[in-house]
Amino acid sequence: MSNTVIVGAQWGDEGKGKIIDILSKDADYVVRYQGGNNAGHTVVVAGEEIILHLIPSGILHKNKICVIGNGVVIDPQALLDEIEYLRCRGIKVKNNLRISRNAHIIFPYHKILDKLREEKFRKTKIGTTGRGIGPCYTDKFARCGIRIADILNKKVFKEKLQCNMREKNEVFRRVYKHKTFSFRATYDQYLKFAKKIEPFVCDCAYLLNDALKAKKDILFEGAQGTHLDIDHGTYPFVTSSNATAGGACVGSGLGPAKIDKVIGVIKAYTTRVGEGPFPTEFSAQLLKQIRNRGKEFGATTGRPRRCGWFDAVIGRHAVIVNGIETIAVTKLDVLDMMPKIKICVGYKYKGKVFRHFPADIEILWKAKPIYEEWPGWMEDITRTKYFSKLPKNARKYLERLAQLLETRIEIISVGSERNQTIFI
Ligand code: IMP
């Protein structure tokens, strides 16, 4: 299968979980490289919905090594809960799960800071998942973060946590007028977590490079999406990691020349959770229709997702910044009963036409989409197995998407089950 990176080409929630699950079948290693339990990957197996937040979807297949790379931030409680959730469903989580020694850890103060910052800066609120992701990455880049390796060394952990908590408690007290955290309680709790996590710990870069030497195939599971990427997304309305394909190398310890292929996952329309510009966002009537048909509610927070037409400007941007070779178009069936379907091919702002993704946030907020209108197919495609059997208008729609994105469609998803998938 080769070493493949799967990335979301929109604002996350593209249906990556299902595509990763299908492709993991042919991989030996499945690796998460960024984000944390802000992600929610939904996989439907034999009618049962399984939602994963931290552990790679490969865990649902036998004989796969699932790796949480150094680029991921880990909330130990969430991790242990997820292991338990899987075990309760009869899914083995033992030496098939490996966790990088270099991954950073989320502490209770990160989660509180996440919420307090959102409340304090209401006007520029990001709409975070409140999982402490941003504050944890902030510490990582401020070089005061605490990694798995650190909590496994009592002395190092004690020094680092004391130092961090002195500073954080000062911020809680003075800036937010919030109650402070007790060092002892946090230290003891995280030492207990460390004991439980230790059996899974690995040296991720060595593990993966050895796997390559042994001719194993590695699948990289991107979380969130290109436009939530800290560098390439709709900054500042983004997450705090590199969700794009480049993040796979940095977040795992594998060199770029070892990546063979990048597959972009893109919904047949667009959704976004949280705040930030969304040029093709629907008005109330269409929103209700698509949100209900597509079950567009966040897998992590349950928040209703914002929905809109397919935006080829952001799609094309994703193709470029990720080096996407082929795409998987998901949720095509959600558009089954739409008599007319629009595709955004550019933006217009102050008389100027933008075909490229503009970095100026004001343009993104205020630009009017330039639409093409395509006839719908008005029939149920959820049982279709081959591209040639799709209604003519569905094929034309897909062909237009591929043309606009200058890429090839490899997979089409027409339902949430594994077998509702068309391979081209
Ligand atoms: P954070 O990652 O919790 O800091 O949230 C930052 C932004 O990314 C918010 O708009 C979230 O709604 C969004 N976000 C984070 N994770 C996901 C995801 O897995 N899917 C969709 N949006 C997400």
Image (cartoon, helix red, strand yellow):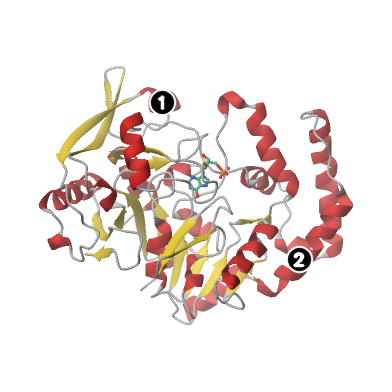
Instruction: Find disc 2 in the rendering and name its residue.
Output: 194
Q: Give the CA separation, mark 1 to mark 2.
A: 44 Å
Closest to the observer, 144 or 89: 89
Compared to 176, does 181 lie above or below? below
Please name the amino acid that badge 2 sits on. Ala
Q: Residues within 10 Å of mark 1 (few under 14, many from 20)?
A: few
- Circle 1 SS class: helix
Locate the C terminus and report the quarter of the image it occupies: bottom left
Image point 63% across, 27% down: which residue? 121
- Circle 2 SS class: helix
Image point 62% across, 68% down: which residue? 83
Instruction: Find disc 1 in the rendering and name its residue.
Output: 365
Left/right of residue 412 with respect to residue 134 in the rendered view: left
N-terminal label among 1 and 2: 2
Compared to 211, does 113 lie above or below? above
Please name the amino acid that badge 1 sits on. Trp
Q: Residues within 10 Å of mark 2 (few under 14, many from 20)?
A: many
Compared to 310, does 347 lie above or below? above
Left/right of residue 417 with respect to residue 235 in the rendered view: left
Location of residue 423 by image quarter: bottom left
